[in-house]
Image (cartoon, rainbow, N blue to C red):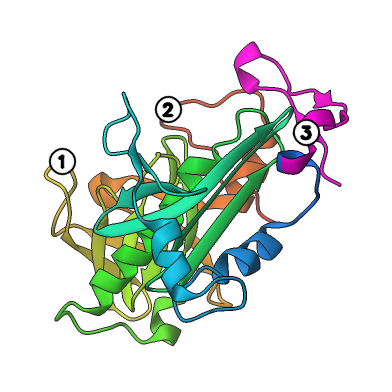
Amino acid sequence: MATGHSAIAFGGERIPIDHIATGAMAPATGFVSTASDIVRWVAAHFFGDERILSDDSKRVMQRTEWQVAGSAGSEYALGFGVTKINDRRLLGHGGGFPGHITHTLFDPHDRIAASVLTNAIDGPAQMYVATVFRLIDLALGAAASETPAVAPDVASRFTGRFANLWGVSDVVDLGGRLHLLDPTVGDPTADPIRLDVADELTTLRITDSPGYAAPGEELVYTRDDDGAVREVRGAGGVTMYPHDPFVAALARTDRARVGDPVVPAED
């Protein structure tokens, strides 16, 4: 069973929090589960699945009964919170217990559910589960666009997580289109940068981006003899490196200097 942890806001490292008896809260918290099991249970609330409730009962249970005062746009149904992400009306619930924060959302019409369980008292479960639906919508929007899809074998040559002293960036395949996203922000889909393939081995071009980005500039990949990515020279000439070896290289030094970047060590 997962051990809960304290908040990072206190400074220093998180510390484990001992399990406590649920006592009178047992009806709400007196059980152990996994994210996959919770998603299976939530799936029974999709329309067309009558293992637990009829569709008529679901309509009654899922309709809005209250507007939550002081929380713009937040509503409550019978046992489920109601929230809107993009054009989706989602239902779900969050929970907290000493050392743990969780959140689950589902779309009963499109039959999609996601659940995030964290073992930290400040775990960003609600943000993460919302991001799942935002990424799904970005992928669906990309798939519906008139831009030709990138073949999966070509896309896979470019996708990955890259890092430098400025931060972390993800090149991702969503709906057959490549995007450059910032995984460190609350909503990585808020300002997506769309990438087109200019050369199937070496080059992506920024074709759609926010105003402060660099439309028209290129991401140029340098590869080892085996085809593995060594570095990516991006917009403005800033170089990125595959995330894991970069982080490992950074861990081996106690100081970094602008103009003398930390790079993955040679084998």
Q: Residues within 10 Å of mark 2 (few under 14, many from 20)?
A: few
Q: CA distance from mark 1 to mark 2?
A: 22 Å
Image: magenta residue range: 1-27
**Nearer-N-terminus badge (1/2):** 1
Q: Nearer the viewer, residue 47 or 216?
A: 47
Q: Point out the frontmost of discs 3 and 2.
A: 3
User: In percent of the image, x 35 and y 45: which residue is there?
Assistant: 65
Q: Point out the frontmost of discs 1 and 2.
A: 1
Q: Nearer the viewer, residue 112 or 226?
A: 112
Q: Quadrant of the C terminus?
A: bottom right
**Nearer-N-terminus badge (3/2):** 3
Question: What residue did someone put label 1 on?
Answer: 212
Question: What residue did someone put label 2 on?
Answer: 258
User: In percent of the image, x 60 and y 23: which residue is there?
Assistant: 255
Q: From what the image shows, is residue 142 above or below residue 115?
A: below
**Which secondary structure lies at badge 1?**
loop
Q: From what the image shows, is residue 230 above or below residue 99?
A: below
Question: What residue did someone put label 3 on?
Answer: 4
Q: CA distance from mark 1 to mark 3?
A: 40 Å
Work out whether residue 158 can be spotted. no
